[in-house]
Image (cartoon, rainbow, N blue to C red):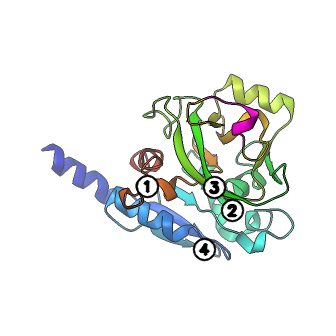
């Protein structure tokens, strides 16, 4: 089969789901990025849905689900759609949470650790640099060691976990990204929220559930002169 015919057939069967919770506000940015990558609209999944509609990969976007009452993601974790996503992930399905989506995945127990209030107790909205900590995951396998400039926008982005969990993250290469400076140096000065070990993203041990605080969908369009986040999203979509 001709390569482009094969690619068209491959993309035709690709079904990417995008969940919207009350308070999500990054779902449209992510929708546009997914469409740019795959050439078609993602499957819209509402928080009350109980059917993933045959999706092969699911995104949980950023925002303020349920107003971030209690803790960020603590209420969204109990949405009907999350019960399906938990089963989907436990059966090997690919799931990626960005910012608030990352917080929801930790609350649901699909990712280790938790996201605490930023160490300065302020909401941080800026562009930062991150670097891959491993290439042994589908979303980092095609990245180089070069720093990526990706926006952040969060008040509870300080990653924390107990020492034994951190040991496991390091042993099984579950740390996906670390905050760094423009030269790729990791230090407290380049850590925007006080995250443990400058961690900006992690995955589960089986490497099918991913979470990161920076927003790659906000760095995926040449019109804004930044496509540093595009390969992260493309790798997830094309492996779904």
> Which of the two labelled residues, at mark 4 and mark 1, occupies the earlier sequence position?
4
The Cα–Cα distance between marks 4 and 2, rounded to whole angstroms, is: 10 Å
- The span shown in magenta is 185-191
Is the residue 59 above or below the residue 26 in the image? above
Other residues around mark 4 within 10 Å, as few (<14) / some (14–19) / many (≥20): some
> Which of the two labelled residues, at mark 3 and mark 2, occupies the earlier sequence position?
2
The residue to which callout 3 is attached is: 126
Look at 73% across and 67% down and name the residue there.
76
State which mark lies toward you, 1 or 2: 1
User: Do the CB atoms of the residues marked 4 and 1 lie less than 8 Å apart?
Assistant: no
Is the residue 1 above or below the residue 184 in the image? below
Residue 19 placement (x, y as % from top left): 57, 67
State which mark lies toward you, 3 or 4: 3
State which mark lies toward you, 1 or 3: 3
The residue to which callout 2 is attached is: 83
* SS for dot 3: strand
The Cα–Cα distance between marks 4 and 1, rounded to whole angstroms, is: 28 Å
The Cα–Cα distance between marks 3 and 4, rounded to whole angstroms, is: 33 Å
Instruction: Name the outermost residue toward the left.
Output: 2
């Amino acid at each position: 089969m001709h390569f482009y015919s094969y690619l068209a057939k491959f993309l035709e069967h690709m079904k990417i789901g995008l969940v919207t919770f009350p308070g999500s506000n990054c779902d449209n940015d992510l929708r546009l990025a997914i469409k740019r990558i795959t050439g078609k609209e993602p499957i819209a999944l509402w928080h009350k849905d109980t059917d993933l509609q045959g999706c092969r990969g699911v995104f949980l976007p950023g925002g303020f689900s349920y107003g971030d009452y209690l803790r960020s993601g603590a209420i969204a974790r109990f949405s009907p759609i999350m019960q399906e996503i938990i089963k989907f992930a436990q059966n090997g399905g690919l799931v990626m949470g960005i910012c608030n989506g990352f917080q929801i995945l930790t609350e649901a127990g699909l990712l280790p650790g938790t996201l605490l209030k930023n160490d300065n107790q302020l909401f941080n909205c800026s562009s930062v640099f991150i670097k891959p900590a491993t290439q042994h995951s589908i979303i980092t396998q095609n990245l180089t060691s070069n720093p990526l400039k990706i926006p952040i926008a969060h008040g509870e982005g300080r990653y924390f976990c107990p020492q034994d969990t951190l040991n496991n993250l390091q042993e099984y290469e579950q740390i996906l990204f670390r905050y760094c400076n423009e030269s790729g140096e990791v230090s407290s000065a380049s850590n925007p929220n006080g995250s443990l070990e400058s961690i900006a993203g992690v995955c589960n041990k089986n490497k099918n559930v991913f979470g990161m605080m920076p927003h790659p969908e906000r760095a995926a369009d040449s019109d804004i002169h930044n496509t540093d986040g595009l390969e992260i999203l493309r790798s997830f979509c094309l492996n779904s």
